[in-house]
Image (cartoon, rainbow, N blue to C red):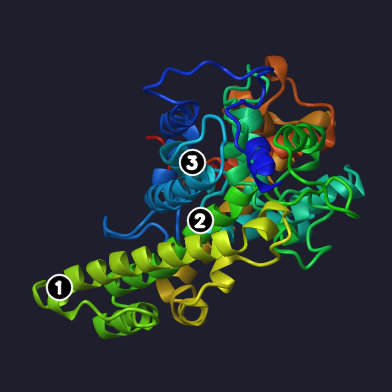
């Protein structure tokens, strides 16, 4: 039973392909997926998108790109360890320890690829524009109630699915045509905006597709053999790899945020040591001998962070295997980090971070500025496409339309006649910007920075 389910879930079939491609032995389908993502423009833009500390003045602090690479590294370890277990226990054609690791490593590169500039403040800024700004409200008056939820609860996870399966390489059906398990690994919330929060199951806390991709996502879910929810329409349970990617993401932002906070002097080295020690000493001894040979304080913090990640990786795989049947059925209702032995220590780190890091001055100051930047951009471009579509354009709105790249307008640069689609194309444009490019366009629109 479990073996057959794994056979269904781990496939080299690509979304948009009718058959499984023949891959050379030296470069598997999943390794190709990793390479496609690394070389994509959407992934490159993550180098200038906020992780936690926006536009940090030091080049040490993580961006979305470095965070994604770190999550990918942890995912490769988790996937390889799980792969060793699967190879030892089951007969699954084509699966090896390394291929399982490659699936998760590739999926991790994509997990934040749909996030707008300025971190999570960017998602909130887009949502608040359509909820509170008169231009945003007027725009939503033209779309259906179901479509409104996509804008009122703008979600980077849904933008990631849209970006990778439709916008990137748009000439292909399936966009980048990644393999089904790679896509499924970063789909944490396999439902639409109308189904989010209708269940206390972790898979429905947010959503992973916009109404524009409803039919598209349904086809993906069926091809990936995701299990449909019993009562919620157009909603499915997670692929098991999504639990592991979520855990790797949680590990990295929890432990790494402590390290970054130390580098920005928001927490002392002793404070960082205490958080790491709480996890290490749960079942292990502190590596005092090794620490005594590391002279610099910052290097000791880095070493303990790495050591702690290794312990958590072991805990996660053990818990995953213990709950394998439940996870395969999609019935694991909470994140893996909530059921590992170190769950209390992890929860304490998260409480500290929310209380002391995410509300620190550097985070708040640029987050507030990000709200203003994105509101101004959306006001300008939503207002422009709305005016042009209604035949009420002006020289200014036409210049703004000319500024928008071709891929964010319909064929021949004609404004989409569907109000929902034309405003979704604006959010495609704005959410794809890097932090610095968004600021540059903001300065141009407001006349703060003139090209003279």
Q: From the viewer's perspective, is 310 left or right of 217?
A: left
Counting residues from the N terminus, which is met first, the one under dot 1 or under dot 2?
2
Counting residues from the N terminus, which is met first, the one under dot 1 or under dot 3?
3
Please rate how many residues cluster around mark 2, counting C-alpha atoms within 10 Å: few if below 14, some from 14 to 19, many from 20: many
Q: Is residue 442 visible?
A: no
Q: Quadrant of residue 174?
A: top right
The Cα–Cα distance between marks 2 and 3, rounded to whole angstroms, is 33 Å
Which label lies toward us, 2 or 3? 3
Please rate how many residues cluster around mark 3, counting C-alpha atoms within 10 Å: few if below 14, some from 14 to 19, many from 20: many
Give above or below for 195 relative to 266: above
The Cα–Cα distance between marks 1 and 2, rounded to whole angstroms, is 38 Å
Q: Which mark is residue 118?
A: 2
Give above or below for 100 relative to 57: above
Q: Is residue 144 visible?
A: yes
Residue 212 in picture, x, y percent from top left:
79, 36
323 or 69: nearer the viewer: 323
Q: Is disc 1 in contact with disc 2, using a CB cutoff of under 8 Å?
A: no
- Secondary-structure class at tag 2: loop
Which residue is denoted by mark 1 in the rendering?
290
Counting residues from the N terminus, which is met first, the one under dot 2 or under dot 3?
3
Give above or below for 268 relative to 232: below
- Secondary-structure class at tag 3: helix
Which label lies toward us, 1 or 2? 1
Tell me which residue sits at (40%, 51%) in the image: 77
Residue 375 in picture, x, y percent from top left:
63, 54
Which residue is denoted by mark 3 in the rendering?
100
Tell me which residue sits at (44%, 47%) in the image: 84
228 or 171: nearer the viewer: 228
């Amino acid at each position: 039973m479990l073996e057959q389910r794994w056979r269904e879930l781990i496939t080299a079939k690509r979304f948009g392909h009718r058959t499984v491609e023949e891959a050379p032995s030296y470069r598997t389908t999943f390794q190709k997926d990793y390479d496609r993502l690394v070389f994509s423009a959407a992934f490159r833009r993550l180098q200038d998108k906020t992780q936690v500390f926006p536009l940090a003045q030091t080049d040490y602090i993580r961006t979305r790109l470095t965070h994604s690479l770190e999550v990918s590294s942890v995912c490769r370890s988790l996937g390889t360890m799980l792969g060793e277990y699967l190879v030892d226990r089951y007969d699954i054609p084509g699966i090896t320890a390394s291929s399982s690791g490659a699936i998760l490593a590739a999926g991790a590169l994509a997990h934040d690829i749909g996030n707008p500039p300025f971190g999570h403040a960017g998602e909130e800024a887009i949502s608040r524009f359509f909820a509170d700004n008169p231009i945003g409200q007027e725009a939503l008056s033209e779309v259906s109630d179901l479509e409104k939820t996509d804008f009122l609860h703008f979600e980077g996870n849904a933008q990631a699915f849209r970006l990778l399966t439709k916008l990137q390489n748009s000439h292909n059906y399936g966009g980048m045509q990644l393999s089904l398990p790679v896509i499924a690994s970063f789909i944490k919330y396999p439902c639409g905006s109308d189904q989010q929060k209708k269940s206390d199951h972790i898979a429905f806390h947010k959503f992973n597709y916009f109404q524009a991709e409803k039919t598209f996502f349904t086809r993906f879910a069926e091809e990936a053999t995701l299990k449909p929810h019993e009562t919620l329409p157009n909603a499915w349970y997670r692929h098991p790899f999504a639990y592991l990617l979520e855990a790797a993401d949680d590990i990295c932002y929890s432990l790494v945020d402590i390290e970054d906070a130390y580098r920005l002097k928001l927490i002392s080295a002793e404070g960082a040591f205490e958080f790491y020690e709480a996890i290490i000493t749960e079942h292990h001894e502190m590596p005092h001998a090794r620490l005594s040979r590391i002279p610099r304080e910052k290097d000791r913090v880095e070493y303990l962070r790495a050591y702690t990640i290794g312990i958590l990786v072991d805990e996660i795989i053990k818990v995953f295997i213990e709950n394998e049947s439940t996870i395969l059925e999609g019935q694991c209702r909470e994140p893996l980090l909530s059921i590992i032995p170190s769950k209390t220590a992890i929860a304490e780190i998260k409480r500290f971070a929310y209380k002391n890091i995410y509300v620190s001055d550097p985070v708040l100051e640029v987050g507030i500025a990000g709200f203003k930047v994105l509101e101004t951009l959306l006001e300008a471009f939503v207002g422009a496409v709305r005016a042009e579509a209604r035949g009420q354009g002006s020289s200014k709105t036409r210049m703004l339309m000319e500024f928008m790249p071709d891929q964010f307008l319909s064929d021949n640069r004609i404004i989409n006649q569907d109000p929902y689609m034309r405003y979704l194309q604006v959010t495609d444009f704005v959410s794809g910007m890097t932090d610095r490019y968004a600021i540059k366009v903001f300065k141009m629109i407001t006349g703060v920075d003139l090209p003279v």
